[in-house]
Image: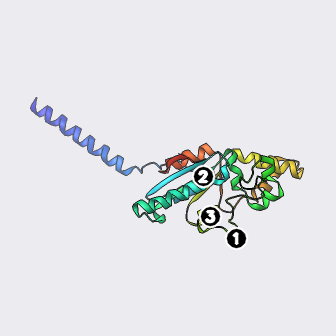
């Protein structure tokens, strides 16, 4: 019996070793499957800093979500001395917030303010420009930094919901009397702020950012 038991244990040890060798020879699966080339998900590789957060902007709110993302970085620096280079911010514009992805030329040509009843609270007039696309010449230093181009230039990411982008496409199609949605979308894309990345939906974008290690906050 002793010999049989010893042989049994020896066989188990060899089997375990073989299984271990097989496992080590098999490459680990990728964290995410390869993405369809139609969608740019390479931004996930840039979400690689120590502190990560995604700011969800389903409302227009005058671009408040961007201000909150910038404040997050400023406040971490004040409290912990954390440099901006150690922080990854992902801003997702969806729903009503998708209009923030469009440049000032689009806002003026297609009267975005009037179409959506976006008014300047200070003047009561319809907005004629994207409040976070650029800063006026007389803007304060902090306001001058609170633009999407400056935000992206600092290594942060802006994602736009393609489903919500359908509203932009519809406005272009209606205004320009275009025959097809494809034609209207092709033109609408030319008005996106450089650097903004369209994703299948805002839900996809926010959840994918969380998979990349971001904490989530509803920012508008």
Asked whether, in this view, residue 165 is left or right of residue 153, the answer is right
Please name the residue that numbered disc 2 is placed on.
65
Q: Quadrant of the N terminus?
A: top left
Report the Cα–Cα distance between label 2 and label 3: 14 Å
Asked whether, in this view, residue 126 is left or right of residue 135, the answer is right
Question: Which circle, 2 or 3, is nearer the viewer?
Answer: 3
Regarding mark 2 in the picture, which secondary structure is present there?
Answer: helix
Please name the residue that numbered disc 1 is placed on.
137
Report the front residue among 200 and 109. Answer: 109
**Residue 36, above or below 2:** below
Report the Cα–Cα distance between label 2 and label 1: 22 Å
Regarding mark 3 in the picture, which secondary structure is present there?
Answer: helix
Asked whether, in this view, residue 101 is left or right of residue 211, the answer is right
Q: Which mark is residue 143?
A: 3
The structure residue drawn at horizontal position 55% and vertical position 44%, both measured from the top left corner, is 207
**Residue 97, above or below 192:** above
Q: Residues within 10 Å of mark 2 (few under 14, many from 20)?
A: many
Question: Which label's residue is closer to the chain start, 3 or 1?
Answer: 1
Regarding mark 1 in the picture, which secondary structure is present there?
Answer: loop
Q: Position of residue 78 (x, y in %)?
A: 44, 62
Question: Which label's residue is closer to the chain start, 2 or 3?
Answer: 2
Circles 3 and 1, Cβ within 8 Å, touching? The answer is: no
Q: Which mark is residue 80?
A: none
Question: Which circle, 2 or 1, is nearer the viewer?
Answer: 1
Q: Position of residue 68 (x, y in %)?
A: 56, 54
Q: Residues within 10 Å of mark 1 (few under 14, many from 20)?
A: few
Q: Is residue 161 visible?
A: no
Quadrant of residue 142 within the rendered picture: bottom right
Q: Position of residue 49 (x, y in %)?
A: 46, 60
């Amino acid at each position: 019996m002793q010999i049989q038991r010893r042989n049994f244990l020896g066989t188990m040890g060899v089997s375990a070793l073989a299984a271990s060798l097989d496992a080590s020879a098999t490459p680990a699966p990728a964290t995410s499957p390869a993405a369809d080339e139609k969608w740019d998900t390479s931004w996930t590789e840039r979400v690689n800093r120590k502190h990560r957060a995604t700011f969800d902007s389903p409302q227009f709110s005058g671009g408040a979500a961007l201000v909150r993302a910038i404040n997050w970085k400023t406040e971490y620096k004040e409290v912990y001395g954390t440099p901006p280079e150690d922080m990854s911010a992902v801003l997702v514009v969806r729903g009503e917030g998708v209009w923030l992805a469009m440049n000032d030329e689009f806002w003026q040509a297609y009267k975005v303010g009037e179409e959506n009843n976006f008014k300047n609270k200070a003047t009561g007039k319809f907005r004629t420009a994207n409040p976070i696309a650029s800063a006026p010449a007389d803007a304060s230093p902090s306001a001058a930094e609170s633009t999407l181009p400056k935000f992206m230039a600092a290594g942060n990411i802006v994602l736009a919901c393609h489903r919500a982008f359908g509203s932009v496409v519809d406005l272009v199609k209606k205004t320009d009397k275009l025959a097809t949605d494809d034609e209207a979308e092709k033109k609408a894309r030319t008005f996106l702020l450089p650097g903004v990345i369209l994703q299948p939906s805002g839900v996809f974008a926010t959840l994918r950012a969380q998979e990349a290690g971001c904490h989530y906050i509803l920012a508008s």
